[in-house]
Amino acid sequence: MTQESDPPAIHAGTTLHRRGEWLTARVGDEMVMMDADSGSHIGLTETGARIWDLIEAPMTFGAICSALAEEYDAPAGAIAADIVGFLQQLAARGAISLEPPA
């Protein structure tokens, strides 16, 4: 029996990088992604699609939270709590890598 590992910890200084060859298509405010190598699919909400846009170039978790807080007029702490699980799922699916702070 294999044991699932805990999702990677994400801190303000964690840098997020896109991974793989994900094809994307906008459907209204949402996005559908497909990994060209595995055929795996991911559907993103409007906020998830915005995060994907933000990390076109590597970006820290803190910078993502700040950008979303400004765009959505919400506290950065609330944004962080809302998106950390989503980012861990993207990492588990191989869409992003998480580089711990130095």
Image (spheres, grey):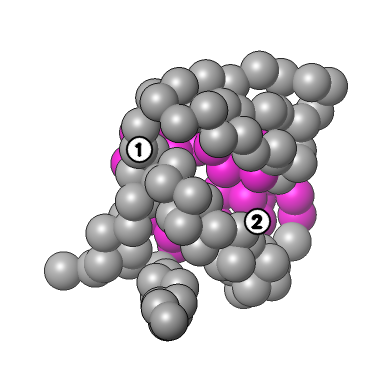
Q: What is the spatial separation of the Cα atoms under label 1 and label 2, in whole angstroms?
A: 25 Å
Location of mark 1 (residue): 19
Q: Is residue 99 left or right of residue 57?
A: left
- Against 77, residue 68 (above or below) is above
Q: Residue at x 64, y 38 (%)?
A: 42
Looking at the picture, which amino acid does disc 1 mark? Arg
Q: Residue at x 45, y 31 (%)?
A: 38
Residue 91 at what x, y percent from top left? 44, 55
Q: Is residue 40 above or below residue 27?
A: below
Frontmost of labels 1 and 2 is 1
Image coordinates for residue 67, horizontal then vertical, percent = 56, 48
Residue situated furthest right in the rendering = 28
Q: Is residue 35 above or below residue 84?
A: above
Depth check, front residue: 80 or 98: 98
Any part of residue 87 in sight: no
Is residue 84 found left or right of 44 in the rendered image? left
Residue 34 counted in the magenta span = no
Indicate the quadrant containing the C terminus: top left, top right, bottom left or bottom right. bottom left
The residue indicated by pointer 2 is 69
65 within the magenta span:
yes
Residue at horizontal 43 percent and vertical 81 percent from the top: 1
Tell me what residue is drawn at x 41 percent, y 46 percent: 94
Circle 2 SS class: helix
Q: Tell me the kind of residue under disc 2.
A: Ala
Q: Which residues make up the magenta segment?
A: 48-73
Total label count?
Answer: 2
Tag 1 secondary structure: loop
